[in-house]
Structure formats: C-alpha cells, structure tokens
C-alpha cells in the first residue's frame, strides 16, 4: 500500500502493520515539548495522577519563551514551575534566560528535532519542524502530560493534501509570502485536521529558513502538520545541527492525497494578511495609505538570521518614521549574537528600533510591544486575530521582513521597491 510521508512516519512509530486516514493509533513519541504557558498544566496533571518519575527525561524539552523574561509575578511563577520540574526530573533539555530562544527556532537549531522524528508540543506552532521532514504537531497539555508518563500519545491519522509550487520567486518574495498566499487561497479551515505537504520546484530551491516559515503557519490553515520531504538542503542542515542518526521518509508514488493544489507563483508580489484573519490576504501593492503605529520583526515565523539580514539591508543608513515603534526580536541567543557580530543590531538601533532579547513577546500579546486601542501594527508574526497583540480594537497586519522594514521607514505599508 503506497503511503504519504506523514503516514510513513506515523506507521513507523506504531506497532501496526498498516494505517489509513481516520484510524485512531497510539504512537511512540520521540520528543515532547512544553513552554511556560502549557507545561505548568502538564506538570500539574502529571503530579495530580500521583506520578513521581517521567518516562524518559531525554525525551522532554521545556522552554519558557512566551512571557520570558518574566513580565510579572505570574509569569515568574510559571517559569519557576518549569525550572523546578526540570531539576527534579533531571531534564537536561531545559532552556531558560541566557540559553533560551523561541522554542520553534531553538529546537531545530540545537538538533533536537531531525528528519523522521515524531514530535508533539503543547503549542500549535510545533508543526514548524515539518520543514525537516519530521511529523510534528501541536497537542493539549494533558496529551503532553501523558507522554511524560509512558512516551505515548493517541492520534487520529489525518488525510494529506499536496501543494505544488511552480515558477520562480521574485525579488523580496519568500516562504512567508508563499504560505500567506496559500492560506489566502484555501482559507483558515482549508486544511482542517489535514497534513499539508509542500513540494515542487519552488520549494526545492527554498532555504531552510523559508521552509520553517511555511511549515510553521500550516496551523493557520487548520493543518495538523506541514511537511516537506527532506532533500540535500534539509539533510545538510540536520547533519550540521546533530550527530544523531535519522531516517529519511518520502511519499510513495501513487500515495493518496485528498486534494492536490498547483500554484504558479511567477507573478507573485509580497503578500500581506489584513485584519483579522491570516486568510485575509492581499498583494502589498493593493494596500494604500495604511498608516502604522508599530512594526515587529521577529517570532518563531520570521526571527531567524536571514530574516534579520533582509530587514537590516533595507534599514541600513535610514531612519524609521518619527513616532513609529520598531521592535526587532531575534529568535534565539545564537541568532542574537550573530546579529551583533554582523553589525545588524547596530543598524536596527541606529535606525530607531529596539533590539530585544529572544522572546515570543508581542506575538501573542504577551509583552514587549502590546497595542492599545486604535493602534495598528505590521508584524512578521503568524496570527492577526482580534486582540492578538493587545486591545481588541487594535489591528495587526502580517508580512515578510522586507515589507516590514520598508514600511517602518515610510510609516505605512509599502513594497520595498517603493523606497527607491
């Protein structure tokens, strides 16, 4: 029976001989991830069950990143719960202030997720790791707690949908634009409880950073996972990050897909998601006179070094519009140091920006850039729901780093080419 890459990975993590979409299966989890919002609940459930020892401390990762550095007493308490549990259970993969980063950028960077792995995380953007050819998906805190107990989790096998991208990317267009265009085309429920499999000549030439961005936002279309078959680009990345062995899975010829989409992106310009849905997408040239109060460059979607390089290239020697707030957040400490080493941090600060320590911060309305009533923000983050970044009467637009940087200079949403 021919299988998709997702089905192959799931099957390899069960004791079954065959599976099909709709089956309920119990899988062996390679890694369980929790953060400062979700892990305290999982830890509480684990202890409430009277358990004292986790199944395997090497298969647990705890990252306080959402409200860290702690913005208030409650945040500090949540971070302390993770720290105490990690110490008590001898969990090596606990990353706090000084060594932490935004979890979905940090885990691949450290080689904790590799091709063929099955990863669950009590955070919806766990699907990011699908860019490496891993089956990675978000779960609830109680599911995470169960994996602490015996390293297992229940899944319903999802159907797969294939997305083929043909043509050639234009200047200033990247992974963020591809995924925004896709979500705009199929809607926020267009891949509900389905695996999104990204492929085609455009994906083959896309950088790992661009691939992470696409897989990260599969959940914004309702996707259970966002997978890309590992090629030399992914394999090279994985081998540089870890010496651990991994297995490559690829979809069989004749594998069943619920639907296949083919997009020719040759004429695509940078895309912008308008309030209040990631699917409310327009080409940047369609947006006129959208004045901004704040721009955020960062997050698990677009806080990697290539994103910062693109933004710095546009901002170098320029100033942001007076009165506008520009917040730049590298996704990990390694990226932070690289940005300092390359002089990017200096470019941002000289342009009038704040260069922050790694944190999810404003993406979820946590801290470092909360919007008040009537304020409008353009962000490289992944969601723009009502009240996502603060007040329910604020507005959030989503774009790639190039559009964000150019718009910070002009004070309104614009194409980078408009600066010439």
Image: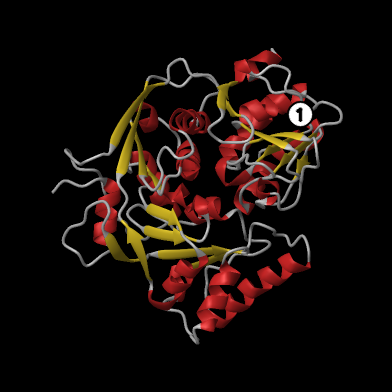
- Dividing the picture into quadrants, the one containing residue 290 is top right
Q: Position of residue 162 (x, y in %)?
A: 32, 36
Q: Is residue 306 above or below residue 59?
A: above
- Dividing the picture into quadrants, the one containing residue 80 is bottom right
| Side of 412 where 230 appears, left or right | left
Which residue is depicted at the point 30% across and 54% down?
A: 157
Q: Position of residue 395 (x, y in %)?
A: 71, 35
- Dividing the picture into quadrants, the one containing residue 257 is top left
| Side of 420 where 383 appears, left or right | left
- At label 1, counting other C-alpha atoms closer than 10 Å, the crowd grade (few under 14, some 14-19, many 20 or more) is many
Which residue is depicted at the point 45% across and 28% down?
A: 185
| Side of 159 where 61 appears, left or right | right
| Side of 127 where 288 appears, left or right | right
Q: Secondary structure at mark 1?
A: loop
Q: Is residue 235 above or below residue 178?
A: below
Q: Which residue is mark 1?
A: 292
Quarter occupied by the C terminus: top right
Q: Is residue 282 above or below residue 375?
A: above
Residue 212 appears in the figure = no
Q: Position of residue 118 (x, y in %)?
A: 36, 59
Residue 98 appears in the figure = yes
Q: Position of residue 63 (x, y in %)?
A: 58, 63
Q: How is the image coloured?
A: secondary structure
């Amino acid at each position: 029976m021919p299988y998709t890459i997702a089905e192959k990975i799931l099957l390899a993590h069960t004791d079954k001989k065959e599976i099909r979409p709709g089956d309920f299966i119990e899988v062996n989890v390679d890694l369980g991830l929790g953060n400062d919002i979700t892990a305290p609940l999982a830890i509480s459930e684990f202890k409430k069950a009277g358990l004292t020892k986790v199944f395997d401390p090497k298969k647990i990762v705890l990252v306080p990143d959402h409200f860290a550095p702690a913005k208030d007493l409650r945040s500090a308490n949540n971070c302390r719960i993770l720290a105490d549990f990690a110490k008590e259970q001898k969990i090596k993969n606990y990353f706090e202030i000084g060594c932490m980063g935004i979890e979905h950028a940090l885990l691949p960077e450290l080689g904790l997720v590799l091709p063929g792995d099955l990863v669950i995380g009590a955070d919806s953007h766990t699907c990011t790791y699908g860019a490496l050819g891993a089956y990675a998906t978000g779960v609830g805190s109680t599911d995470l707690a169960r994996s602490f107990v015996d390293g297992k989790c229940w899944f319903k096998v999802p159907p797969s949908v294939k997305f083929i991208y043909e043509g050639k990317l234009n200047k200033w267009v990247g992974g963020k634009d591809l995924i925004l265009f896709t979500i705009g085309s199929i809607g926020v429920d267009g891949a509900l409880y389905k695996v999104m499999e990204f492929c085609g000549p455009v994906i083959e030439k896309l950088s790992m950073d661009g691939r992470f961005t696409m897989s990260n936002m599969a959940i914004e279309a309702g996707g259970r996972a966002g997978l890309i078959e590992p090629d030399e680009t992914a394999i090279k990345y994985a081998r540089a990050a870890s010496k651990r062995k991994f297995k490559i899975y690829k979809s069989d010829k004749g594998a069943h897909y619920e639907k296949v989409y083919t997009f020719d992106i040759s004429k695509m310009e940078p895309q912008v998601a308008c309030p209040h849905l990631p699917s409310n997408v327009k080409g940047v040239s369609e947006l006129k006179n959208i004045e901004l109060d704040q721009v955020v460059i960062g997050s698990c979607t677009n806080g990697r070094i290539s994103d910062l390089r693109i933004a710095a290239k546009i901002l170098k020697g320029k100033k942001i519009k007076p009165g506008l707030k520009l917040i730049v957040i590298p996704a990990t400490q390694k990226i932070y140091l690289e940005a300092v080493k390359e002089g990017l941090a200096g470019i941002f600060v000289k342009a009038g920006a704040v260069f922050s320590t790694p944190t999810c911060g404003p993406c979820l309305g946590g801290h470092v850039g909360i919007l008040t009533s009537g304020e409008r923000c353009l962000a490289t983050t992944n969601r723009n729901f009502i009240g996502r970044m603060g007040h329910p009467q604020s507005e959030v637009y989503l774009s790639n780093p190039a559009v964000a940087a150019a718009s910070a200079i002009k004070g309104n949403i614009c194409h980078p080419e408009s600066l010439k």
